[in-house]
Image (cartoon, helix red, strand yellow):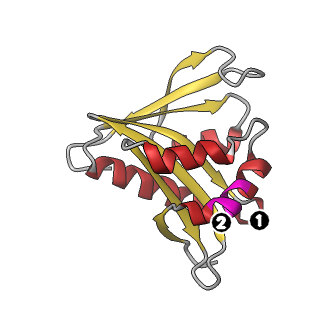
Amino acid sequence: MLSPKIRNMTTDDLDQVMEIEKSSFPLPWSRGSFEKELRDNNYACYLVAHTGENGKITGYAGCWVLFDEAHITTLAVHPLYRRTGTGSVLLTSLMELAYERGARQVFLEVRDSNEAARNLYEKFGFKIRGIRKKYYLDEDALVMARNFGTTGL
């Protein structure tokens, strides 16, 4: 399968993003949350992965960059494109963007039960740093983090 193309998310992407969001998370973000992030949050960076030929969005990821820290807010891949490398390309692209904006470490929360996501983050050098009790209301979150080297990722 071809590697996905990456670009900045726009509000025109939100119909497809919401489809992926609803199929990926038991407590999905609202469309309004994405719109507010894209429109009003100067710290936010949101990317989409797409196929190129028909513009089909296959995944998305976002983070906030504040000073020297990045916080990954979301990462999801369409069910038909999971295990194709899309998540890795999105994560790499997001971390490169965060580094370019001055981040020297990156944090995220992940469901304790989400083994696929945990494996992806561990593959990229993230380590468990703590637990946020009932972060997802129905489940605890693991706080994972990694530092960037002096030359980047």
**Residue 49 placement, left or right of 28:** left
**Which comes before the other along the chain, label 1 or label 2?**
2
Dots 1, 2 in contact, CB < 8 A:
yes
Element carrying mark 2? strand
Helix, strand or loop for the magenta stretch, by majority? helix
Q: Is residue 62 above or below residue 147?
A: below
Q: Residue furthest bottom?
A: 53
List x then y, in percent, for residue 14.
Answer: 64, 59
**Residue 95 placement, left or right of 35:** left
List x then y, in percent, for residue 11.
Answer: 56, 60
Q: Residue at x 79, y 51 (%)?
A: 23
Reading the image, the residue beneath label 2 is 58
| Front of the two marks 1 and 2 | 2
Reading the image, the residue beneath label 1 is 80
Query: Magenta segment, which residues?
Result: 14-18
Q: Residues within 10 Å of mark 1 (few under 14, many from 20)?
A: few
